[in-house]
Image: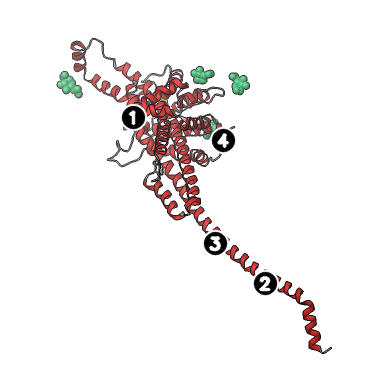
Amino acid sequence: MPPNQRSRSLLQRHRGKLLISLTGIVALFTTGSVVVFFVKRWLYKQQLRITEEHFIKEQIKRRFEQTQEDSLYTIYELLPVWEMVLNENDLNLDSIITQLKDQKNQSTRQKSSESIESSPLKTKAELWNELELKSLIKLLTITYTVSSLILLTRLQLNILTRNEYLDSAIKLTMQQENHNKINHRLYDWVTSWWSNPQGKMVDSMTTKKLKKDGQEVYINEQAFLSLSWWILNRGWLDYNEIVTNQIEIEFQGIHPRDTLTLEEFSSRLTNIFQNINSQIFQQNNSSLISIFLPKGSGGQEFLLSQTLDPEALTCFHSNTLVFNQLINELSQCIESTATSIVLESLINESFHFIMNKVGMKTMAKKKPGQEEQQNYQMAVFSMSMKDCCQEMLQTAAGSAESGSVNEYLATLDSVQTLDDLSASVYSNFGVSSSYGFKD
Ligand SMILES: *[C@@H]1O[C@H](CO)[C@@H](O)[C@H](O)[C@H]1NC(C)=O
Ligand SMILES: *[C@@H]1O[C@H](CO)[C@@H](O)[C@H](O)[C@H]1NC(C)=O
Ligand SMILES: *[C@@H]1O[C@H](CO)[C@@H](O)[C@H](O)[C@H]1NC(C)=O
Ligand SMILES: *[C@@H]1O[C@H](CO)[C@@H](O)[C@H](O)[C@H]1NC(C)=O
């Protein structure tokens, strides 16, 4: 056999094998490049996704910061309203001061009491006693109520904001799948946050049904937000009662002319704080929750009748699902140990603030030649407390000319545990009983 014939037959004999392995190699190369192609595309998509995720995370973080700021502004809006409530409830210290000033003008007093009023005016001693008692009561009532209000507002706004961005995120995902217009939708979503922080994203295709649902949700959220009405009009009275009892015990027998050192004053105040705290943070006692929330459906109805107009109230009654969910979450938060700890930190912070302010104001009232003096009349402490109350309730409008912020609110707002609690509420996706802070 000639050699090339032999090789041909060899080729012929192995032709099938060769073809198979060649196909194999081609297939291998093809598969390889396809794999590389897909890997590249996958990597590219991952990259996009990471960028988007990063972007969304940034937005969520920004929204968190904005929510905490909004909470503070809300308190600024609410304080003047509450100040009016306090004044109507016999805690108007300025009116006592006015009466004291009138007292100096004896002739005016005598004339007016003889000619106009049947009821005799209070004596100077009575007025000073009244100032002592009421400045203490007001100072502590402000402390407990404002601490609770700032906590309540943080909880409310963080719960609502989280629901809102969860809604938006779910909508976004669905829209991505349907239309694949990622950037446009993302843009809508983000701009809707910026341009209309309270508003919901309203799609142009929304049907009437959706609009009705939207309105119901909106009214449900309004009802939820109106809970601050409760604490400022009813709940605070519970604090007022507890505070009054403790003050009467601790300052009994101390008259406006009696003198105390700063340390003595501080230690009496410490006792009061400790006793009040042990009452409100008592285990098995629902006194705290009844300060924050109306009791039972009767209380709730009363609150809503005070805060919603009749039309909204009717709409609210047609569907209360969202409201009930929000209230459930809020109640669980308020009853959690974490919340009690935060409230206690806010109260502790308030105590330091008060002692600092009252101490400074009292020392500043020393007359020349009294620099060495360590004892102060209770009446001087009362005046300092009155001034301190005024500062704690001061809002932007009242201090426009000085351009200053409310130092007390700023102090409370920067308490670290308050931020921690807010963050845990804001990022609580497993909405139900599984709170990170439930004990
Ligand atoms: C004090 O009484 C007199 C006489 O009634 C009156 O003219 C005067 O304005 C009063 N002063 C003050 C500060 O009220
Ligand atoms: C809870 O404590 C407050 C304050 O001590 C008290 O007035 C109230 O009666 C207590 N409530 C219950 C249910 O024990
Ligand atoms: C407090 O509550 C727990 C659980 O609800 C109960 O077992 C306990 O008896 C209560 N204690 C008091 C003093 O009421
Ligand atoms: C508040 O102050 C009291 C007394 O100084 C202290 O025992 C308590 O641990 C403080 N609470 C918080 C939450 O910081």
Dot 1 or dot 2: first in sequence order is: 2
Relative image position of residue 261 (x, y in whole percent) = 43, 27
Residue 201, image x, y percentages: 41, 44
Residue matched to label 3? 44
* Res. 81 mark: 1
**Disc 1 versus disc 4: distance between alpha carbons?**
32 Å
Residue 215: name its quadrant: top left
Question: Disc 2 residue type?
Answer: Val
Which amino acid lies under the numbered mark 4 shown in the image of this protein? Phe
> Which residue type carries mark 3?
Tyr
Does any atom of ligand 2 lie closer than 8 Å to the CB of label 1? no
Which residue, given by chain and number where applicable, does mark 4 sit on?
Answer: 437
Give the Cα separation between the discs numbered 2 and 4: 61 Å
Q: Is residue 20 visible?
A: yes
Tell which tag, 2 or 4, sits nearer the viewer: 2
- Picture residue at 36% right of the left edge, 32% below the top: 78
The amino acid sitting under disc 1 is Val
Q: Residue furthest right?
A: 1
Task: Give the Cα separation between the discs numbered 3 and 4.
Answer: 40 Å
SS category of the residue bearing label 1? helix
The residue beneath circle 2 is 26
Q: Is residue 403 above or below residue 258?
A: below
Q: CA distance from mark 1 to mark 2?
A: 81 Å
